Amino acid sequence: MPFPDLAVRVTELRGRISAAVERGGHGQSVKIIAVTKTHGPDAVDAAWSVGLHDVGENRVQEALRKMEAVRSPVRWHLIGHLQRNKVSALSRFDLLHALDSSRLADAVHAFGLAQERPVDALLQVNVVGETSKGGFALPDVPAEAGRLVGLHGVRIVGVMTMAPFDADEAILRTVFAGARRARELVLAAGHPATELSMGMSNDYEIAVEEGATMVRLGTALFGARAA
Ligand SMILES: *Cc1c(COP(=O)(O)O)cnc(C)c1O
């Protein structure tokens, strides 16, 4: 069996997540999104077999190929940037985490109308203005959230963010608390925004302390990626 220590790792991660929920005091429940990018379909089936029913992929083509080979009925999350000419792939995903621009939102809305089923998405926020990453700056969130209320092809069910790699704890807390604030703004605009997708293998405990409801874990589950 591939990934023989996966069950042990999941038990350990769930324990750490519970402890972080306690420390943070937000009382949320936390879903692990198993990030299987660069791994084969066997990683997805291994995740399913240890009770991880949500899988994250950051590239559309890789994800679609993997879906063909996977038998487990996992929920597929698209966690990476989506090009506007590939929005039709959203019919294969349960949740888009990276709604990162108004133009993409317009394209997703149009696709949701065309398929007569709104697309569930998270608004990506870029709290400290990293130019290498997409997403909305906090001051732009209220206006965009207000605009999106009128776009019935997309349903904003929460907020997603990525912290700078290797940032110190103070920066991480600023980023994650900023995303939590963004979720309040999105909720106040009238969206059913309950989810907060933040935290990866190196920073998930702080993200959970700050209120994450979804953590996206790759390395912590499957080990270092070759690519
Ligand atoms: C790869 C990736 C992750 C997982 O990263 P790890 O550090 O391996 O846990 C999470 N989120 C996004 C958007 C990713 O691309």
Image (cartoon, rainbow, N blue to C red):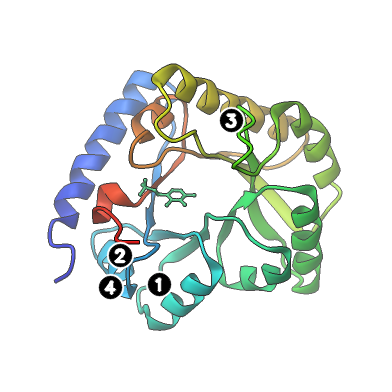
Asked if labels 4 and 2 touch by Cβ distance under 8 angstroms, the answer is: no
Could you tell me which residue is drawn at 72 percent across and 62 percent down? Answer: 118
Q: Secondary structure at mark 1?
A: loop
Earlier in the chain: of badge 2 and badge 4, it is 4
The residue to which callout 4 is attached is 42
Earlier in the chain: of badge 4 and badge 1, it is 4
Rounded to the nearest whole Å, what is the CA distance between mark 2 and mark 3? 29 Å
- Which of discs 2 and 3 lies nearer the camera? The answer is 3
Dot label at residue 73: 1
* Label 2 crowd (10 A; few <14 / some 14-19 / many >=20): some
Residue in the foreground of this view, choosing between 202 and 191: 202
The type of residue carrying mark 3 is Ala
Whether residue 223 sits left or right of residue 204 in the image: it is left
Asked if labels 2 and 1 touch by Cβ distance under 8 angstroms, the answer is: yes
* Label 4 crowd (10 A; few <14 / some 14-19 / many >=20): some
Q: Position of residue 98 (x, y in %)?
A: 61, 50
| Quadrant housing residue 139 | top right
Earlier in the chain: of badge 3 and badge 4, it is 4
The residue to which callout 3 is attached is 179
The type of residue carrying mark 1 is Pro
Rounded to the nearest whole Å, what is the CA distance between mark 1 and mark 3? 30 Å
Earlier in the chain: of badge 2 and badge 3, it is 2
Dot label at residue 48: 2
- Does label 3 point to a residue whose CB lies under 8 Å from ligand 1? no
